[in-house]
């Protein structure tokens, strides 16, 4: 090889090297590339020749050094890890789940599909959707759930399959949610709740059978409820759990049912799972940007307090103290799929119990 040939080759390699580095630097400086890259990664059928990656201005979605593309790739990795965990749980347990359109909120404005879970921030997140939805003409939260549901099964399926629709799931520890539901719907007798009227007589039929057997039904109801329908006799958490463990899980109330069934986790690929137990400000900022939500209402995305305050681990532990070890293990078995899918801890709740 002559000196002239070597010089030409060296010059060509140098030009290619400089060009590649300039291109990489330019791509790193843009803040919108992540959307297109994620589409390619998630959908191998996309024709790369037709899928032009645009170059736009870098924007920041938080007040720190995170940029959109950095957040996007970080949360893409998080999504892949969570999706793998959910999928493996479905396969290991040979699970099949079915979608129910009434369990979802769909917003074409936000290009989002959200499976709401009661006692996991659902009421507040629904408000975020409804505040910018032109169809919403009422602040009745139950009406809002109905209005935001996909109008047809076909629309739901299309939304699930559409890669442009961001699918969100929000969860919390199953035991903390269970205690929160008991405190709000059963224990708090300062207000009327439909759940107390439906379930308390059924609970007492198991835990206090003599209350209903020894007297006419009208008399037992007088002992159980005030005239304004508020609960007079409040079953303990232990009684509530004793009754719950004897019920068919397929018929559980929406406030304490299983996540994987309610949100069809073996049928729907969720883009993001937010855990209310330990989320970060960066996560919230990412979600608000990703779904084009109003950041002035970011405070809405938090757990509502019951009359006695938040239900956290310490509060849950206090309620678990009076349960037997067997009852706690049985509760864990009831919600085991949810525990496995979201890597929730069981041991520290088991250690809360004093009973044998």
Image (cartoon, rainbow, N blue to C red):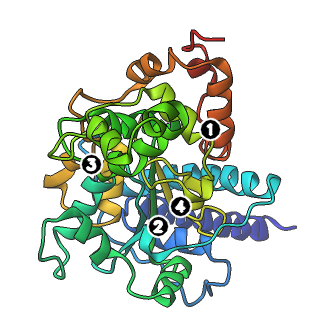
Give the Cα separation between the discs numbered 1 and 4: 18 Å
Q: Is residue 232 left or right of residue 242?
A: left
Q: Residue at x 38, y 47 (%)?
A: 217
Which residue shows up at 62% across the image and 34% down it?
331
Q: Residue at x 44, y 68 (%)?
A: 103
Q: Residues within 10 Å of mark 1 (few under 14, many from 20)?
A: few
Q: Which mark sits nearer the N-terminus, 4 or 3?
A: 3
Q: Quadrant of the C terminus?
A: top right
* Nearer the camera: disc 3 or disc 2: 3
Q: Mark 2 highlights which residue?
A: 167
| Label 4, residues with CA under 10 Å away: few <14, some 14-19, many ≥20 | many
Cα–Cα gap, marks 2 and 1: 20 Å
Quadrant in which residue 221 is drawn: top left
Q: Position of residue 63 (x, y in %)?
A: 23, 43
Disc 3: which residue: 193
4 or 2: mark nearer the eye: 4
The tag earlier along the polypeptide, 1 or 3, is 3
* In the image, residue 29 above or below residue 159: above
Instruction: Give x and y (percent) for residue 179.
Output: 42, 33
| Mark number, residue 262 | 4
Look at mark 1 in the image and give the residue it sits on: 343
Q: Are marks 4 and 2 in contact (CB under 8 Å)?
A: no
CB contact under 8 Å: marks 3 and 2:
no
Between residues 158 and 204, which one lies in front from this camera angle?
Answer: 204
Q: Is residue 126 visible?
A: yes
- Give the Cα separation between the discs numbered 1 and 3: 32 Å
> In whole angstroms, how far apart are the C-alphas of marks 3 and 2?
31 Å
């Amino acid at each position: 090889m002559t000196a002239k040939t070597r010089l030409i080759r060296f010059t060509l390699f140098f030009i290619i090297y400089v060009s590649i580095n300039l291109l990489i630097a330019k791509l790193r400086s843009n803040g919108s590339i992540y959307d297109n890259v994620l589409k390619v990664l998630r959908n191998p059928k996309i024709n790369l020749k037709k899928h032009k990656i645009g170059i736009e201005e870098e924007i920041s979605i938080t007040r720190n050094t995170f940029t959109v593309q950095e957040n996007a790739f970080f949360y893409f990795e998080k999504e892949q890890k969570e999706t793998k965990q959910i999928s493996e749980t479905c396969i290991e347990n040979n699970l099949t789940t079915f979608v129910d359109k009434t369990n979802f909120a769909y917003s074409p404005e936000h290009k989002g599909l959200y499976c709401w879970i009661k006692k996991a921030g659902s009421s507040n997140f629904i408000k975020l959707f409804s505040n910018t939805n032109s169809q919403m003409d009422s602040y009745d939260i139950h009406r809002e759930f109905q209005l935001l549901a996909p109008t047809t099964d076909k629309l739901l399926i299309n939304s699930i399959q559409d890669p442009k629709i961001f699918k969100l799931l929000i969860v919390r520890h199953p035991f903390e949610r269970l205690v929160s539901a008991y405190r709000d719907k059963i224990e708090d007798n300062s207000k009327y709740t439909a759940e107390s009227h439906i379930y308390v007589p059924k609970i007492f039929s198991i835990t206090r059978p003599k209350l209903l057997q020894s007297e006419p039904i009208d008399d037992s109801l007088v002992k159980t409820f005030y005239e304004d329908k508020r609960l007079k006799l409040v079953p303990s958490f232990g009684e509530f759990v004793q009754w719950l463990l004897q019920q068919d899980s397929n018929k559980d109330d929406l406030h304490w049912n299983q996540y994987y069934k309610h949100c069809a986790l073996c049928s729907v690929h969720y883009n993001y799972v937010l855990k209310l137990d330990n989320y970060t400000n960066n996560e919230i900022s990412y979600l608000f940007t990703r779904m084009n939500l109003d950041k002035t209402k970011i405070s809405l995305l938090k757990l509502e307090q019951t009359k006695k305050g938040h239900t956290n681990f310490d509060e849950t532990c206090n309620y678990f103290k009076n349960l037997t070890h067997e009852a706690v293990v049985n509760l864990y078995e009831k919600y085991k799929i949810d525990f496995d899918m979201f890597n929730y801890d069981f041991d520290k709740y088991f250690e809360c119990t004093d009973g044998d």
